[in-house]
Amino acid sequence: MKTLIYLIIGIFFGIVMYKSEAASWFRIYEMFEFGAFHMYGIIGSALVIGVVGVQIIKRNKVKALGGQEMALKPKAMSVSRYIIGGILFGLGWALAGACPGPMYVLAGAGYASILIVIFGALLGTFVYGLLKNKLPH
Amino acid sequence: MEWIQNPWPWYVSGPLIALVMFVLLFVGKQFGMSSNLRTACSIGGAGQVSDFFKFDWKKERWNLIVVLGAAIGGFLASNFMSDNTVEINPEISEKLETYGIKSSGEAYLPTEIFSNESLSDPKIILILIVGGFLVGFGARYAGGCTSGHAISGLSNLQLPSLIAVIGFFIGGLVMINFIYPLIF
């Protein structure tokens, strides 16, 4: 039953990513060129609703299904890991024109080349795991 | 039924993404797409070489199901709900043409990079692998990607997420302004 819920959430997310064109390389390039409001509108409107909704959840101590805590733990503070990691991610996001969510969506849409990007992403994750203790965090 | 075929505007798409985040919160999970890459490494046995991959990945199976769904969603949307073209700002299209990318308005992804024929060019393969590598490495280093930081983290007013998102944009701007002219 739960599996079915996650599958439906995923299908819905995939359709939204594709139809919003957030999964399109062109839209990512256009965003970094500040060529249109589209991507900023998507992220911005999701955020306005997100911030208000999370505040409502926190103030009313809304619980998740089954009475468990909502997964809203604060993130550990640091500057170096977020800025260095963020810059590396941004370089890749603009080069491949896809972030992790859209990669899977594009694979489903039948773009074989995206499998190479996913392979690269797996490799990057693996190498991070190898180097983790040597990197500034 | 034209609204299904046309691209969905930002004021429809953004709220629907927020909805995905809230549904996941409601079932006790956190919206985040890149953690699947770590889970996949664990399943592949990467725990043997790094403790980073030693965790109970079975608990993360739900997220792999979401990924499977996302792929199915991509299949459905591209086959039944779209003409698979993306119109962008004409000025940006013109700029892309100077880089030799002339397929804007005619394709969903630039055929110059993503068509199967382009894979015969080693430079293109390198772009795809390096791009993916940076996304995977950077996402884990920063502890999240667009969904985890830019949507979930910022919604929860997390300063670390704001720093990460600023990093995303520094990286993206450096790539298209300084590195694109070198590689395209």
Image (cartoon, coloured by chain):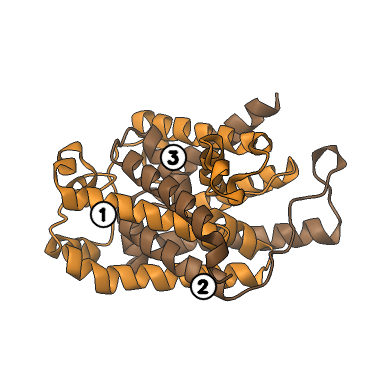
Q: Which amino acid does label 3 sit on?
A: Tyr
Percent across and percent down for residue B77 are 41, 34
* Chain ID at mark 2: A
Callouts 2 and 3 on one subunit? yes
Give the chain letter for orange.
B
* Chain ID at mark 3: A
Q: What's the residue at 42%, 56% (across, down)? A: B135
Q: How far apart are marks 2 and 3 (CA)?
A: 26 Å
Tell me the tag on residue B127. Answer: 1
Residue, disc 2: A83
Q: In front: A36, or B98? A: B98
Residue, disc 3: A104
Category of crowding for the residue at label 3, using alpha-carbon neighbours closer than 10 angstroms: few (below 14), some (14–19), many (at least 20): many
Judge left or right: residue B94 versus residue A48: left
Chain A drawn in what color?
brown
Percent across and percent down for residue B102 are 15, 54
Label 2 element class: helix
Of the image marks 2 and 3, the number of the one nearer the N terminus: 2
Q: In which quarter of the image is the C terminus of chain B?
A: bottom left
Outermost front residue? B49
Tell me, yes or no, if residue B145 can be seen here.
Answer: no
Q: What's the residue at 74%, 56% (across, down)? A: A72
Judge left or right: residue B120 versus residue B75: left
Q: What residue type is labelled 1?
A: Ile
Vertical placement of residue B133 versus B180, above or below: above
